[in-house]
Amino acid sequence: MTPDTNAWVLIDRPTTDVVRLTLNRPDSFNALSSEMMTALSAALKQAADDPECRVVVLAASGRAFSAGHDLREMRSHPELSFYQDLFAQCSRMMLQLQQLPQPVIAQVQGIATAAGCQLVSMCDLAVAADSARFAVSGIHYGLFCSTPSVGLSRNVARKRAMEMLLTGDFVDAATAVQEGLINHAVPADQLEAKVLELCRKITEKPAVAVRLGKALFYQQLEMGIAAAYQLAGQTMACNMMDGDAQEGFQAFLDKRTPSWKS
């Protein structure tokens, strides 16, 4: 497909089974205005409904991945109802990333701050250029990054998350890897190749197992351990009934490469 270069979010396919969504407001550092979030939410839904899409890559144009919410937009609407609607919209979009049937990989080429850092934290995987930096910096402006704290605290240790939230300090890409916010930091000229390598590894696996596994992973995290094991056991039993799982086990016994149907 040919992306609409004027769109808030560009959509293209680096490979047949990978959809790449690129935030496309570089002049505003890809701020998450209400328009940007509406466009991204629509693009995510389109990808979710695409039967050929196996992985979604979330990228950005320009120097920043995303600087977070659009402060000019927020300042121009000093009403509680506007803020409530804006943050509710943001929360729905962030949850959409986890509810998507396909894995989502953040491809981070520049800074990711506040809700932009939240966006990275809510993706299933994240790869960054080694020059990228991350911060939840609302505290500098008198606003604790409450909604970004939800994703951040589910990626990094509690005390480290609190330090980032209370100081607004940046962390570099190498530190972000060590602390679990991202998976890999690579030279900028290797960023796309590393992301596509991860895409290839995922698309080589059976689609049903990936879809069931992603859904189970996030559901069980919010449960007590007994309920988590119950759900995990039921999910594995259903997964085993899939033809690809049967083929995988038989291929292992036959000492051959499996032939997936999906």
Image: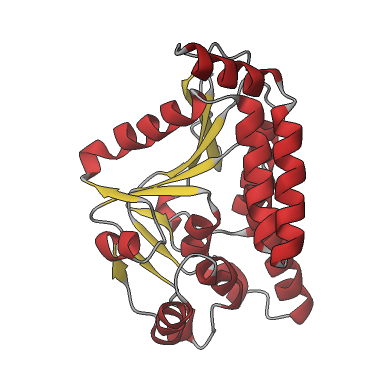
Question: Can you say whether 172 is above or below 210 in the image?
Answer: below
Residue under the point 63% across and 13% down? 261
In the rendered image, residue 12, in percent from the top left (x then y), is placed at 50, 26
Identify the image quadrant of the N terminus.
Answer: top right
In the rendered image, residue 172, in percent from the top left (x then y), is placed at 27, 65
Residue under the point 51% across and 88% down? 142
Res 3 seen here: no
Q: Quadrant of residue 246?
A: top right
Residue with the most extreme front position: 253
Residue under the point 42% across and 49% down? 126
In the rendered image, residue 168, in percent from the top left (x then y), is placed at 39, 80
Question: Can you say whether 161 is above or below 252 in the image?
Answer: below
> On the picture, is 125 further left or further right than 109?
right
User: Is residue 24 or residue 244 the one in the foreground?
Assistant: 244
> On the picture, is 256 further left or further right than 78?
left
In the rendered image, residue 233, in percent from the top left (x then y), is placed at 72, 46
User: Is residue 34 or residue 137 the one in the foreground?
Assistant: 137
Question: Can you say whether 184 is above or below 91 in the image?
Answer: above
Res 88 seen here: yes
